[in-house]
Image (cartoon, helix red, strand yellow):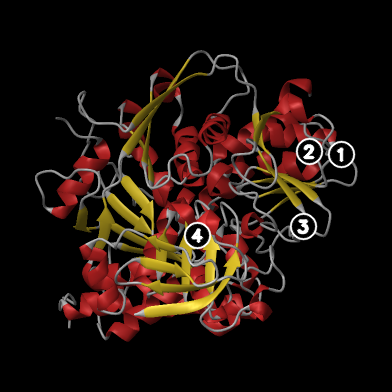
Amino acid sequence: MIIKGKVHKFGDDVNTDDIIAAKYLVSTDAKELGSHCMETVAPDFAKKVSAGDIVVAGKNFGCGSSREHAPLALKGAGISAVIAKSFAGIFYRNAINIGLPFLEMQDAGDIAEGEILEIDLAGGVIKNSSSGKVYKTQAFPEFLQEIVRKGGLINYVKSKGHCKNA
Amino acid sequence: MGHTIAEKILAAHAGKKEVRAGDFIEAGVDVALGNDITAPIAISEFRRSGCPKVFDNKKIVLVPDHFAPAKDLRSANQCKVLSEFAGEQDIKNYFEVGCMGIEHALLPEQKLVLPGDLVIGADSHTTTYGALGCYSTGVGSTDLARAFIDGKCWFKVPPTIKFIYKGRPGRWIGGKDLILYTIGNIGVDGALYRVMEFAGPLIKKLEMDARLTMSNMAIEAGGRAGIIEPDALTLKYVRGARRKYKIYKSDSDAQYEKVYEYDVSSLEPQVACPHLPSNVKPVSALKDVVIDQVVIGSCTNGRISDLSLAAKLLKGRKVSPGLKLIVIPATQKIYLEAVKEGLAEVFVRAGGVFSTPTCGPCLGGHVGILADGERCLATTNRNFIGRMGSPKSEVYLAGPAVAAASAIAGRITHPGNI
C-alpha cells in the first residue's frame, strides 16, 4: 500500500490535548473530532489538511492521555499517516488498534512543511518527492503486522474466535 | 539472570516461565477499567464484535468520573452508555455518582486492585496502582473492548529503569515533589516505553498515598508502569481484600536498563511550570508568580492525606482576595472523612469551594475552567497548553502544601513561609 500526501510539520512532545482537546471528548465521531484536531496549537490545521496528508513530528508524539479520540481525530481530519522520531506508548497501541498507519523515523527532522511524501508501508520506505531523498524505516514486528493485516484489533480477535461466550 | 517485578507479573499472566524486554505477549488481565470518556468507544467496539457477553462481569470496572456528575447533555449521554451497559452485562463494579470517586483513588480504596495483579485501564493514569506492586498500565478504548471479549491484552514487554531515592528530605517534601523532581530530571520521554521501578530507603518510608502519587505520574515521563515493591505497609493497606493476591519482588540480579540514584536531602518543594510536567523548578525560584486559581484534588493528590496537609495550612486563614480555591476530594469516602474531620469546614471558611468528587478541572472538563490569561496552580498531573481551559491560560503543578500556601499568598509560595 502506497500513501502519498503533503506534510504538516510539528515539533517534539505533541500531546493528546494538542491533538484533540478534552472539551471535544463528548463525541466519538471521527469527522467531528477531526474538525477540531490540533486546534489549540495550530488553529487552521483542520482547514488546511487535504485527504491523504501526512503529519511529521519530533520525539514522543501522542504523549499524555489514553484517549483513542486522538488517532481518531487525525484520521477524521483526513490524515493518512503519522511519521515521528518516537511515539508515546498508548498512542502507539491506539494507532495500531484502530489502523492509523505510522512510522518511526529518526530523520523526521529533515522533512519540511508542505513537502510531498510517498510511503510504502509494507516495505517501510519513505520517499520525499520534493527533495528526492529516500528513507528506510524499520518494518513493524510480525505480531503487530498481523493485527494491521486483519484490519485492527477487534477483527484480529474475532478471527481467532476469542469470544468465549458466543 | 534474574527478573524484575514487571517481567515476573507479565510472565505469570501470559502463562510463560519467563519473559524479557522486547517480547510480544498476550496476557490475561485481573482488572479492565474504563471511564465515561473511554468506555463508550470500547462498548461500541464490543458490540460491533458481535460478542454477546463480557468475559467476566466481576473483572470489569466502570467509573463515570471525568465529566461526571454529568456536566452537560452530551456528557450525560456518555455516562448513560456506561450505566446501561453495566445493567445489561451485570457488571459488578459499576460506580454511580453516589458511590463513585476518581477512578485511580477509588480502585485502591475499594481493594479492587491488588499486589501482583495485571491491570489495564483505558486511562493513562492507570499507572497509579503500581504503588501496590502490580503491573498496571494505560491502554486505549479498543484494547478495553478486546479485554471485554476475552479478558486479554497484548503487551510488548518494556525494559525497566530503577529509581533509588535516599537522604533525609525536609518537612514539606511529599510524593509529588519526588516524582516532579524525577520527571524534571529525565524529561517527559525519559522513561518512554519503560517500566519505572521506584525503590530505596526513602520509598519504604513513604505512606501509601504518597506512593500512589508517584506511580500515578510515571506516565508523565512516558512510563508504561510505575512499580513499587510491596512491603509491610502494602500488606496493611490491602488487608480485607476479597480475593487472593501474590507478592512479586525483583531479583537481586534482575536486569535494569538504567539506574538513577537521587539524594533528596536538600530538595525544595517542586513546581512544574507551563507547559510540560518536566519543566520543573524549585518553589523558591518562582516567588513572583501571581495566580488566579488553586485546585487541590485529582487522581494525583485528592486523597485524605493531601486534604489534611492543605487544611493544616489553611486553618484559621483566608485565601488571597480574588483567588479561587477549589478543593475536590477524590472519592465519596474521602469526602465524608473530610467532612467528619472538619477539613471541609476549614476550606469553606478559608474562602474555598468544596466539590463532589470529579476529574473535572484537571482536564478542562468542568468545576473550574480557566479563562483567557488566567493562571492556576494545581495538584493535578498535566500542564499542557489549554489543559484546564483557555489556550491562553497557564497551569503550574505542585503538591498540596505548596498549593495551600500559594492560595493564601496569592502567588506561588513555599509552605514554610506561611
| Three-letter amino acid code at the position of disc 2 | Ala
Q: Nearer the viewer, residue B73 or A126?
A: A126
Q: Label 3 amino acid?
A: Leu
Per the model, the C-alpha gap separating discs 3 and 1 is: 18 Å
Give percent across and percent down for residue A4: 47, 79
Mark 4 or 3, closer to the camera: 3
Tags 2 and 1 in contact by the CB under 8 Å rule? yes
Q: What amino acid type is highlighted by mark number 1?
A: Ser
Mark 4 lies on residue: B100
Observer-side mark, 1 or 4, equals 1
Question: Quick one: label 1, few (<14), some, or many (20+) residues within 10 Å?
Answer: some
Density class for disc 3 (Cα within 10 Å; few <14, some 14-19, many ≥20) is many
Q: Which residue is mark 1?
A: B320
Frontmost residue, B47 versus B71: B47
* Disc 2 crowd, CA 10 A, few/some/many (<14, 14-19, 20+): many
Dot 4: chain letter: B
Which callout, 4 or 3, points at the residue further toward the start of the chain?
4
Which badge, 3 or 1, comes first in the chain's sequence?
A: 1
